[in-house]
Image (cartoon, rainbow, N blue to C red):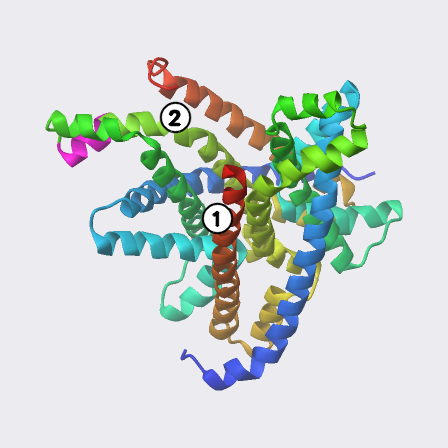
Amino acid sequence: MTDWSGYIGLILQGALVTIELTVLGSLLAFVMAFAAGLGRVSRFLAVRALATTYIEFFRGTSIFVQLFWVYFVLPFAGVTLSPLQAGVLALGLNVGAYGAEVVRGAVKAIGREQREACIALNLSRYQSMRHVILPQALPLMLPTFCNNAIELLKATAVVSLISLTDMTFQAQVVRAQTGSTLVPFATILVLYFLMALAISSGMRWLERRVTRGLDGVRT
Amino acid sequence: MEWDWNFVWEIMPTLLEGLKITILATVFGAALAAVIGLVFAILRMTAPKPIAKATSFIVEFIRGTPLLVQLYFIFFVLPDIGIRLPAMLAGIIGLGLHYGTYAAEVYRAGIENVPRGQWEAAKATNLTGRQTWIHVILPQAIPPMIPALANYLIAMFKETPLLSAITVLELMNQAKSVANSSYRYIEPMTLVGIFFLIMSLISVVFLRWLEERYAQVEER
C-alpha cells in the first residue's frame, strides 16, 4: 500500500502554484481588459487600431500556442522568462483580450441619455467615465468576468506542459512515481472544481457589493 | 537566430499533415459535442428530478475542470478499468464531452426562448409531442442558437493543441517534434501561430455572416 500523505502534499504544493498563477494572471487580465476595452472606444484611431489588433491576435490563436511561443521563441529575441513569468504573461494577455470585449460591450450598453447628461453637466471625459459610465457598467461585466476567471483557472493546467510545477504537473509526477492514475487525477479534478466554485461564489459576493445602491437604476 | 525560409518550406508538409489531424479532431469533436449537448439538455429539462439534478452536477463539474486534466483522465485512468482507447479517439471524446456541456446550455437557452404560446398553440391544434418538436419548437429554437454554437466550434478548434499532451500527432505536436529534432523553435512555433490566426480570422468572418443571416430570420 502506498503512503499517500507525501503525495497529497506534493499535489497541494502544486495547488498553491495554480492559485498563484490564477491570481496573478487574473490581475494582469483585468488591467489588460480595461486598457484594451477602453482603448477600443477611444476617439483616437491609432489607439483603437492598436487595441483591436491586440484583441484579435490573442483571441485568434490558442492559449497553448501563445504560451509555447512566449516560452520557446522569445528567448531567441533576447527575452528569457521563467516558466511562471511566461505563464502569467500568456494567461493574462489571452484572457485580457476576452475581457476587453466584455468591457467594451458593457460601456456601449450604457444608454445615450447618460452620456448626454454628462455633457449637460459639463463633466470632462475622464469624470464622466469614472463617475457615471463605469459604476453602471461594472455590474454588467461581472458575470462574464466570473466565467473568464474560471476559464483562466482551467487554462492554468496548460502551463504544466512548459514544466511549471502546477497541480497538473504534480499529478503527473505522482502518476510516474506510484503508477496509480485514478487517485492523483481524481484528486486534482475535485480540487479544480472546488477552486472554480470558490471563484463563482466570490464573484457573486462582489456582484452584490457593486450593485448596492443601483437597485432603482437597473431595469 | 534568423528566420530561415528554406527551413519553412522543408517543414511545411509535416505541419500540413498535422493540420489535417487538427481539423479531423475538430470536426468529430464538434459532432460528438452536438449530440452530447442535446442529451444533457434534454435530461436536464425533462428527466425526473434526481436525474436532472445529477446531470446538472455533472455538467457543472465538467465545465469547472480543465480539459487537459479530463484528457489525462480519459487517456490514463480508463485503461486501468479495462477501457483502452487510441489517443485520437480519447481526444475526440474529451473534446466532445467538454464542449457538449457548453452546447447543452445553448440548447437549453434556445428551447426556453420559444414562447409558451407556441407550445399551447401546438396543443390546441392537437399535434403530437413528436410533431410539436419537429414542426413547431425546433425550427424556431435552432436558428438563434447557430451563432453561439459556431462560437464554441471556434473555441474548440483553438483547444485542439491540448491533444498533443496525450500523444495525438496534430499540428502542435508535429511542430514540437520538428523543433526538438532540429533545435529550431522560431519557425515551427510561429507557423503554428499563423495557421491558427488565419483559420480563426476566416471563421470570424464566417461567424459574422451567420449572425447577420440568422438575426434576420428572428426579426421577421
Q: State which quadrant residue B22 falls in.
A: bottom right
> Which residue does the image show at 48% across and 55% down from the upper left?
B204
Percent x, y of residue A108? 32, 36
Q: Nearer the viewer, residue A81 or A44?
A: A44
Gap in angstroms between the C-alphas marked 1 and 2: 28 Å
Where residue A135 sits in the image (x, y, percent)?
30, 25
- Element class at badge 1: helix
- Chief secondary structure of the magenta portion: helix
In the orientation shown, which residue stands out farthest toward the bottom? B6
Taking depth in this image into account, of A195 and A116 the one nearest to the observer is A116
Q: Circle 1 marks a residue in which chain?
A: B
In the image, residue B86 lies at what x, y percent?
80, 59
Residue under numbered circle 1: B212
Q: Is residue A130 magenta?
A: yes
Q: Which of the pair A210/A79 is nearer the observer?
A: A210
Residue range of the region highlighted in magenta in the rendering: A124-131
Q: Quadrant of the N terminus of chain B?
A: bottom left
Which residue, as the protein is rendered here, is positioned at the far right? B82
Mark 2 neighbour class, 10 Å CA radius: few under 14, some 14 to 19, many 20 or more: many
Label 2 sits on residue: A139
Residue under the image location 61 percent in, 34 percent down? B110
**Which residue is drawn at the image coordinates 87% and 44% (left, top)?**
B81
> Which is in the foreground here, disc 1 or disc 2?
1
Relative side of A178 to A116, left or right: right
- The x and y percentages for residue B159 are 59, 53
For residue B214, what is the image quadrant? top right
Look at the picture and state if B103 lies above or below B158: above
Q: How many marks?
A: 2
Q: Chain of mark 2?
A: A
CB under 8 Å between discs 1 and 2 = no
